[in-house]
Image (spheres, rainbow, N blue to C red):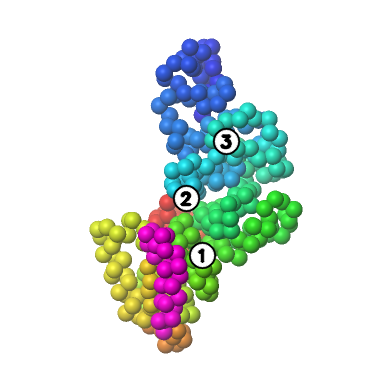
Amino acid sequence: MPSRIDPLGMRGPTRGEAYGPKWRRTSHGFFVPASEDPGQVEQRIVEAAAVLPTYGGVTGWAALRWQGALWFGGTTGDGVTPIPVTLATMVCDIRPVRGIAVSEERLDPSELTELDGVRITTSMRSVTFGMRHAAGLRSAVLFADMAMYADLVSQAELAAWASSNRGWTGCPRLRDALPLTDENSWSPQETIALRLPWVLDAELPPPLTNRPVFDRNGRHLGTPDLLDEEAGVVGEYDGPVHLAGSRRGRDVRREAEFRRVGLETFVVTAADSRDPMGVVRRMQEARARARFDPPSRRAWTIDPPPGWVRTDTVARRRALDVVQRTRLLGYRIS
């Protein structure tokens, strides 16, 4: 946490130390040791929180990150350009500081909480703020998806908030985004590069996400990023981690398993961002090739065998105990 100057040097640097090489000024009157990385996300958040007035809290992506939603990295889509930390204060009585934005929207005391010494807005306030002020519809969907990945809000909770808070700036965007959100998207690229192009660009029926697929003997064949259950189509997003070593081998074997039971597959990669219409054609062609088998004739099923614990909704994940979360959600980054 940034410190103010302390003449005794006990709770912060002395005046002489503060302006020496071992300390770094973060904002007016606040300093941290020069060894603290100003680009580290959590450090950015605590430095911004230090300038909060008596009333207010960190909100938006930074509040969600502080609660453990690690997909909120604090940068734009390029992964480099930092996004300002927003402080919800109701009034703008903060000196301008690089990397900090101020929201003057109304703020009820019930929407404030404290976690590990940092005042933040509640999950609901933080998520709805981010969705309302997102750059566009898809960005709003992504914001909600990644908050739900961390189990901080659910679709039902967001819908309840939207129905009783219609007058806020950006609410039309939030309401438009809600039907497109998904509680089981596992990464930003699954949302932006796979599911939303499938629904919005290819205009195909909403798919299931990360739903385990089994053969008729109950053997787990794989958990595809996207599944069109009606047609029998599997879609995967392959990032850089999928292209090397044993991971690539596992992906190839899993694709073979899907094809063996009659599932049509397609893959989207990072390079496909340069040809979005090519992705759309690939999706539509995959569905056109699909078998559309009725459930009684499928060699595969999404009905889990006895003892399988489902984790595809926020409610189901919240209901897990500590041991179950460790065992079943070990793939998650948060």
Label 3 vs label 2, nearer the camera? 2
Residue lying at 54% horizontally and 63% vertically, measured from the top left: 182
Question: Which residue in the protein does label 2 denote?
Answer: 77
Question: Which residue in the protein does label 3 denote?
Answer: 100
Q: Earlier in the sequence, mark 3 or mark 2?
A: 2
Q: Earlier in the sequence, mark 1 or mark 3?
A: 3
> Please, what is the three-letter code of the amino acid marked with disc 2?
Gly
CA neighbours of label 3 inside 10 A, class few (<14), some (14 to 19), many (20+): many
> Please, what is the three-letter code of the amino acid marked with disc 3?
Ile
**Height in image: 247 above or below 31?**
below
Question: Which residue in the protein does label 1 denote?
Answer: 196
> Which x, y percent locates residue 120?
60, 40
Residue lying at 67% horizontally and 53% vertically, measured from the top left: 170
Question: In whole angstroms, how far apart are the C-alphas of marks 1 and 3?
Answer: 31 Å
Question: In whole angstroms, how far apart are the C-alphas of marks 2 and 1?
Answer: 16 Å
Please give left or right for residue 101 compared with residue 197 in the image. Answer: right
Q: Which residues are magenta?
A: 268-291
Residue lying at 41% horizontally and 18% vertically, measured from the top left: 21
**Height in image: 47 above or below 288?**
above
Along the line of sight, the residue nearer the viewer: 274 or 73: 274
Instruction: Say if residue 304 shows up in the picture.
Output: no
Residue 260 magenta: no
